[in-house]
Image (spheres, rainbow, N blue to C red):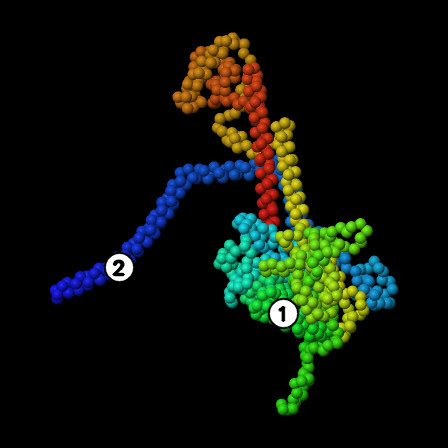
Amino acid sequence: MARYSSDYGTKHHHRRRSNGFSSAFDHNSRRDIDSSLIDDCLAGVKSAARSLWRFWKGSGRQLALGFLVSMLRQVQHNLTMRRLFSFPHALVVVWVLLLLWGERWVFHSRVERCHWSSWENWVCSFFCGCLLRWKTSLTLSEKQPPGATPHRLVLVADPQLIDPHSYPGRPWPLNPITVAITDNYLRRSYNQLQQQLRPDTVFFLGDLFDGGREWKTAHGEFKDPEWGHHPAHEQKYLKSWNKKYGEDYWLREYARFGDIFLGPWIRAGDEPGPGQRGRKLIASLPGNHDLGFGSEIKLPVRNRFEAHFGDPNRVDVIGNHTFVSVDTVSLSARTSDEARQHDLKDIYLPAENFLNGVKKTKRRAVQKELWHQSGNVEEVSYSHRIEQLDESSFKNRPTIDPGEGKADLPSILLTHVPLYRPPGTPCGPMREHWPPTKPPKGQKEPVIPDDRNAISVSRGYQYQNVLSEEDSIRVVESIGHVVHAFSGDDHDYCELKHDEKQAHVPEITVKSISMAMGVPTPGFVMVSLYNPIDGEGKPLLGDAPTLQTHLCLLPRMGKVYSRYVGFGLLCLVALAVRAFLVPVLRLERFAFDPAAEDSNSLMLPMFKAKVEDYDEFSAASVAGFSASRFLHAGDSRGRSGSTTTGSGARKGSRHGYKDKDRDFHRSRQGKWGWAGTSQRGPKIEIKSEEDDIYDAGKWKAASARNRSTVQVVIRELLATAWRVAWMVVLFWVYLEYKG
């Protein structure tokens, strides 16, 4: 037993040692395999490099040199005057002008039509207020009274920068092109807006991004609520979106928004207009594509938006009007169906609290504006006195709020989601997508309800076309003294006046400024504000209107592209006609003929054989001798591979024939022959395909000539069309690259 145990222990010990050696061996073998793989890769790279070097030292250099020579030859061929001032290049010049119009000039001309002086008219308000009565020389032809300095403001809605959420099924080349085209449309339109109109204030009405709500945040729980549900066509993209697009991607989109909209505003300068405090750009109002809608808003997404764009619920005194921005996409969670079953206060409470104290916030903002206009300090001043701590009172502390009943400037509501209206409420004749229904004969009033001309009162995943009636009434009543409301979200223009429940507030839903939002003609709304007040904020114009609006329409790219297509078809027809006329009228050919160019570099001369008279020999003897000599020459060429032979000339000399006779016989028998002793080499007769061949082969010549004509026409059409196409496309790509 002892021996067995000893043996077992020895075996077990050896097994452990062998296991250790085995693992060390496995580690070394893996290392050897890895090093061998690296060596094999390096050897393959070296072998490929040597093969390339051998190819370069062999025929590679000749091929590269030949390609370079061919390119230089084509460049030299194209730089001739007859090529530069050719018909295809004339079409290219017309294309350049057309592209400059469609990609640049049309934006300038459309925005130029909207200049403030073309529609502003404050003369009526001037007369209604009975201001400056001593200015009796003022006529109705003047657009504004002397000294009037209206505040000029622009409302931009729904730029919705295209991103992977917009067209998730589009392939790679098409999606980036769509992004580039739509971004350039926004950039060009907004550039002209800033350069020509130069508004004092710009407000964005939400939906700055298209998929901002879908991109994962760096902090917080990014998870859909239990009652949330993505539509079926987005379900298959959720995993890839959460993996690819996060905080970094959203920040790049934020920089992209700044490049398109903030850059032109900065380049326009910060110098205010006449009588204005300064220029402002406010983009803090969110849309449902930025945050989501109602109960499905994720708090980290909203926190990220507020951190970069500012508080969505705010009050701004601009042009002696109080602009109140309300985050209605968050407020809508209060009246949602899910609010009855879940606690959604975190979503709607900030907007709710803002509305509860908005009247006080308005009074404070107005008071600060009045202090500024009167030259006083815009902060609360405390009296300097010494008090005993136990006797001091904090009840009557000075405050910036003057209290109720004080001056209240006209209020303007800004909301992304339009206010409630009954289904079928018409939007007016300026709604582009669905114009109003024509009323029956004898009816002057518009057709009500008019579902095709109205904003649909409906909702779905992450959207609701209008606010609930309860929320709309709450917003209007909380703000008070609302003289106008502006909204976005619908992408098309809608103008109406609400009912008594909403204080008869007029509302304009602003068109989208983007060309990719389903409305053929994008646009924006211009607002002119003129409300002169006294030191206490009371209006000097009485009850006269203090606000004027104008819809500015931007280029309709569908028409622009249709002109591109139309002119492209016209170019094809013109080039086809020209290609047909080239062989008919023997016009200058545009197509580059490599065979013709290569023939110029041949060592052998090319010319027509000269026919000379003869009078010494009969036709039969000459023909016999020429035939035998031609056969001898062909046999000689077959043996030596050369067309230059001195034996033929010597043989002809021995028979005593003259050189001019041989030249004539050669022209009758074929292309090959020998020159006399005075010639340097063989003379080759080249017959053109367009030459006539008589007798029995006449029909063959006609067929060859027809084939040659068709080839010339096709070659000319392809060459000219390709020349125009690539130059035009290259110029268009340059314009898109420059923005």
Q: Residue at x 50, y 59 (%)?
A: 242
Choose between 283 and 132: the one closer to the eye.
Answer: 283
Relative to 171, residue 461 above or below: below
- Mark number for residue 24? 2
Q: Is residue 598 left or right of residue 525?
A: left
Disc 1 marks which residue? 351
Relative to 738, residue 640 above or below: above
How would you rate the neighbour count of disc 1 (Cα within 10 Å): few for under 14, some for 14-19, many for 20 or more? many
Name the N-terminal-most of marks 2 and 1.
2
Choose between 444 and 314: the one closer to the eye.
Answer: 444
| Rendered location of residue 515, percent (x, y) | 64, 52
- Which residue type does callout 1 highlight? Ala
Relative to 100, residue 667 above or below: above
How would you rate the neighbour count of disc 2 (Cα within 10 Å): few for under 14, some for 14-19, many for 20 or more? few
- Which residue type does callout 2 highlight? Ala
Q: How many marks?
A: 2
Which quadrant is home to the N terminus? bottom left
Q: Residue at x 58, y 30 (%)?
A: 712
Q: Considering the numbered disc 2 on the image, is that residue within a helix, a strand or a loop?
A: helix
| Rendered location of residue 382, percent (x, y) | 67, 83
- Foreground mark, 2 or 1? 1
